[in-house]
């Protein structure tokens, strides 16, 4: 059996890794691509899910962070900084801890999920809550990196995009070719850009026969790429993608044009319904931002733009355990209260509606 060694070693030739390169890895990448028959039945397409919650810190950010932290170390960095809606900060803190350097992370106060906050703290990140939104945090992080001895590891750092495009390499290998459509959540648009690059490289070198149409989705309350202008006060329960001014805006527009792609907006109720559908009918639990890929597919299938039999890949970016509160909330806003019974077999059987056999 092949033992997975992390994206820098697995794709070293394509990421410029040499014998003397520093490699800081937690074994990221090599994530499952799973068929989703429940979604195929609903849409008439052949639907697969790239399960990025299986990365070491529970999100796709690890693919880029292994490259960003390794190269920061090569440059002699003793400290890195990032702005984050939670997953980048969790990943930066973990990889910095592994490398023995400091990660300072700026997050919007009260707006990141508890699981992600606890990761940054557990890995000894220098966590700072900023009274502002993600866009404010990113501006400060950029200025700090320019004027102080800290290395920026947000996706404006090209090393991050470099690492993240390995997910597209994996999809091509797992399917034997690129899909017809690729659906993906969009916040800063770094990952959308990264996948497009990865797929274009695969097609250019003849490994795949096509580049998929790249379909990106933003939450309706924070959809600058859909409305075509900066959103000053972005809002959505999908806190990971609560971003009003995407850092990779222009690269994403280029990528959409080059792939005959699409940007769409999905409201929070449909995001949560998609999260429930994916968990309940496919067995994959993702955080709300990730479920937007599923909601986006249902939306476009309903609009009639996905021909029957099309091969479709959905990236689900982060694990459901990052932000579990939404799964415990019904669509009417009430809390799910699991049934409590006395410790007897017959009481449990009664609740389950089971009658004794024979
Ligand atoms: N999904 C999840 C779970 C994310 O955490 C993010 C971004 C995205 C999708 C969107 O990716 O920004 O490349 O378009 N999270 C960043 C963070 C902003 O700080 O963790 P993108």
Image: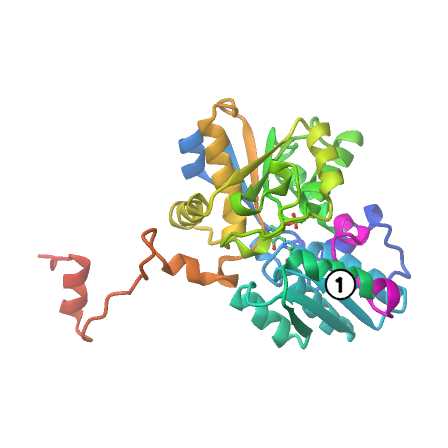
Asked if residue 73 can be seen in this view, the reply is yes
Read off the residue under disc 1: 140
Q: Which corner quadrant holds the C terminus? A: bottom left
In the image, the residue with mark 1 has its CB under 8 Å from the nearest atom of ligand 1:
no
Estimate the x, y position of residue 215 in percent, counting from the top left.
Answer: 60, 34
Estimate the x, y position of residue 161 in percent, counting from the top left.
Answer: 75, 49
Give me the residue at 78% from left, 36% from top. Answer: 201
Under tag 1, what secondary structure? helix
- Asked if residue 258 lies in the magenta stretch, the reply is no
Asked if residue 3 can be seen in this view, the reply is no
Q: Along the line of sight, which residue is nearer the eye, 74 or 326?
A: 326
**Quadrant of residue 259 within the rendered picture:** top right
The colour scheme used here is: rainbow
Answer with left or right where residue 36 lies relative to residue 231. Answer: left
Estimate the x, y position of residue 22 in percent, counting from the top left.
Answer: 85, 64
Q: Is residue 255 above or below residue 309?
A: below
Estimate the x, y position of residue 5 in percent, counting from the top left.
Answer: 72, 58
Q: Which residues are magenta?
A: 145-162
Q: Is residue 271 above or below residue 138?
A: above
Answer with left or right where residue 303 lies relative to residue 227. Answer: left
Furthest residue toward left: 358
Q: Which corner quadrant holds the N terminus? A: bottom right
């Amino acid at each position: 059996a092949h033992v997975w060694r992390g994206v820098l070693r697995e794709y070293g030739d394509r990421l410029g890794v040499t014998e003397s390169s520093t490699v800081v890895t937690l074994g990221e990448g090599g994530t499952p691509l799973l068929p989703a028959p429940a979604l195929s039945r609903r849409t008439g397409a052949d639907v697969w899910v790239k399960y990025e919650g299986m990365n070491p810190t529970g999100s796709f950010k690890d693919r880029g962070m292994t490259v960003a932290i390794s190269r920061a170390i090569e440059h002699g960095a003793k400290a890195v900084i990032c702005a984050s809606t939670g997953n980048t900060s969790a990943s930066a803190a973990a990889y910095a801890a592994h490398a023995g350097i400091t990660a300072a992370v700026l997050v919007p106060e009260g707006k990141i999920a508890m699981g992600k906050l606890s990761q940054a703290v557990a890995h000894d990140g220098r966590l700072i809550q900023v009274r502002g939104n993600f866009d404010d945090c990113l501006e400060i992080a950029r200025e700090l990196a320019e004027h102080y001895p800290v290395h920026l590891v947000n996706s404006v750092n090209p090393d991050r995009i470099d690492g993240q495009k390995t997910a597209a390499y994996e999809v091509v290998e797992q399917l034997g070719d690129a899909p017809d459509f690729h659906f993906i959540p969009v916040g800063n648009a770094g990952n959308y850009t990264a996948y497009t690059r990865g797929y274009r490289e695969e097609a250019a070198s003849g490994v795949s026969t096509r580049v998929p149409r790249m379909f990106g989705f933003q939450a309706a309350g924070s959809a600058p790429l859909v409305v075509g202008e900066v959103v000053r006060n972005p809002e959505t329960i999908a806190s990971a993608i609560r971003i009003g001014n995407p850092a990779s805006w222009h690269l994403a527009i280029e990528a959409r044009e080059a792939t005959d792609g699409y940007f769409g907006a999905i409201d929070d109720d449909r995001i949560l319904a998609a999260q429930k559908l994916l968990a309940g009918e496919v067995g994959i639990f993702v955080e709300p931002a990730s479920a937007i890929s599923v909601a986006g597919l249902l939306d476009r299938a309903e609009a009639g733009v996905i021909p029957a039999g099309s091969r479709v890949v959905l990236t689900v970016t982060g694990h459901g355990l990052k932000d579990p509160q939404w799964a415990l909330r019904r669509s009417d806003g009430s809390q799910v209260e699991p049934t409590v019974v006395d410790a007897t077999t017959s009481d449990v059987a009664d609740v389950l509606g089971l009658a004794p056999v024979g």
